[in-house]
Image: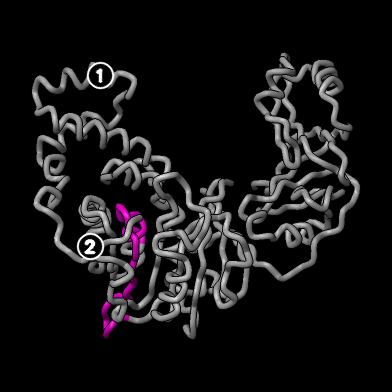
Amino acid sequence: MDRMTDRAPSPATVSPLAPLLSPEGQALLAELRDHDPAGELALATRLRRDHPAELVSAALAQARLRQRAVAKFGAADAYRMYFTPNGVEQATRGSVAAYRAARFRTLAAPGDGDDAPRITDLCCGIGGDAIELARAGFAVSAVDLDPVTCEMARTNVTTLAPGGPPVTVTRADVLEYDLASAGTLFVDPARRGGRGRIFDPEAYSPPLSWAVEAVRRVGAGAIKIAPGIPHELVPDDFEAEWISDGGDVKEAVLWYAGDRAPTAPSVPPVTPGTRRATLLSPRTTPTSPTTLAGHGLPDPPVRAVGRFLYEPDGAVIRAHLVAEVAEELDGGLIDETIAYVTADELRPTPYATAYEITDELPFNLKKLKALLRAREVGVLTVKKRGSAVEPEELRRRLKLKGPHATTVFLTRVSGAPTMLLGHPVSTSPPSR
């Protein structure tokens, strides 16, 4: 997601998608939808007999990007969108963008008369967030630096969010862009550079400090940040939210409500100074997420391993809310530095995966190998926290065979390297 300068693109970049948007280009993209990249050379040779070589190359490149994008956007959207390699890499997952758009409704300033509420999307990239914001009923002003991604953003929003509130895509430097008409502000700074990921928030483009002050000036908004941001860098007047989808942590967001009262009661309101973990899954919707807010609890006590071990969701761990989960489970930690919660009873929780522990052994690979062979374990799930052992290397050394499966936790218990064996158990309520 790059910043932009407010100047017209050169003629060479006015419409980079024109060949693909032509009837011939559309037919090629439809033909390549489910193509196998492994056979691309022969396929390209065949297609070039009937189509210009440049068009074939562009269509093949776009088809590959669409296949990659399915994991983020779903097939229904991904195969109608246009991407750059960086656009696929940096775009927000569709389910996360939809949830975030629904939460923006809690901050929405009213439009003029019957107009839709306005939101400005800085560093919009290929338009993934703008699409969901438009679908949520916002009039969107999207801004980015790269002329190609701007063209893609326009096309993507027009294709996937037609007939709704107006969406404009402007090429302008976000540091100079006029925010006077912004009702709410969303900033998604670039967090990658020529050498890969950028870990210093002040090296983001634009820097985090600039984004924080811009959101404050507008009066309400949010900033997308890397999940690994140190908690001490979160401003006191912002809420920090870590979001996971399907168990994988996808992003963190800093929310600012200013003086605005919540306007969408079905979605959690923004609470300054709060840490929040939000878990998305196929069972949740954008307006009914599973979310846990911190209460400033002290660290849980360390205790002996009980019958059950709970592995908190990554968003819970990133948000430093393991204590809240331990309190809910009437449990404790197995080690003061390890985010595993143990308890004697099985209790339902959406915030952690439960395992029933069958064995607790000092770390010893020979003993582990002998035990697994005796139990005819052929499928071993390896989880580690506080251990240097690599799962793949462990499986290679164990050379397991057999019809049974188990899970081993390589971790520490009260400071001592330990192996815990067990199996996952459901904490979901029984279906009727």
**Residue 391 placement: quadrant:** top right
Which residue sits at x=44%, y=44%?
195
Q: State the image coordinates of residue 336 (x, y, percent, origin top left).
A: 82, 53
Which is more foreground, mark 1 or mark 2?
2
- The image shows residue 281, relative to residue 367, as above or below, that is below
Q: Amino acid at mark 2?
A: Arg
**Residue 328 placement: quadrant:** bottom right
137 sits to left or right of 385: left
Nearer to us in this view, 119 or 192: 192
Q: Which mark is residue 41?
A: 1
Q: State the image coordinates of residue 267 (x, y, percent, origin top left).
A: 51, 69
Q: Crowdedness of circle 2 by 10 Å Cα count: few (<14), some, many (20+)? A: many
382 sits to left or right of 16: right
Q: Crowdedness of circle 1 by 10 Å Cα count: few (<14), some, many (20+)? A: few
Provide the secondary structure element on which disc 1 rests. helix
Asked if residue 426 shows in the view, the reply is: yes
* Image quadrant containing the N terminus: bottom left
In magenta stretch: residue 129: yes
Nearer to us in this view, 225 or 327: 225
Count of picture labels: 2
- Ranked by sequence position, the earlier of labels 1 and 2 is 1
Q: Which mark is residue 171?
A: 2
Nearer to us in this view, 404 or 183: 183
Stretch in magenta: 111-132
Asked if residue 429 shows in the view, the reply is: no
Task: Measure the alpha-carbon separation of dots 1 and 2.
Answer: 37 Å
**Residue 89 placement: quadrant:** top left
Nearer to us in this view, 267 or 169: 169
Q: Amino acid at mark 1?
A: Leu
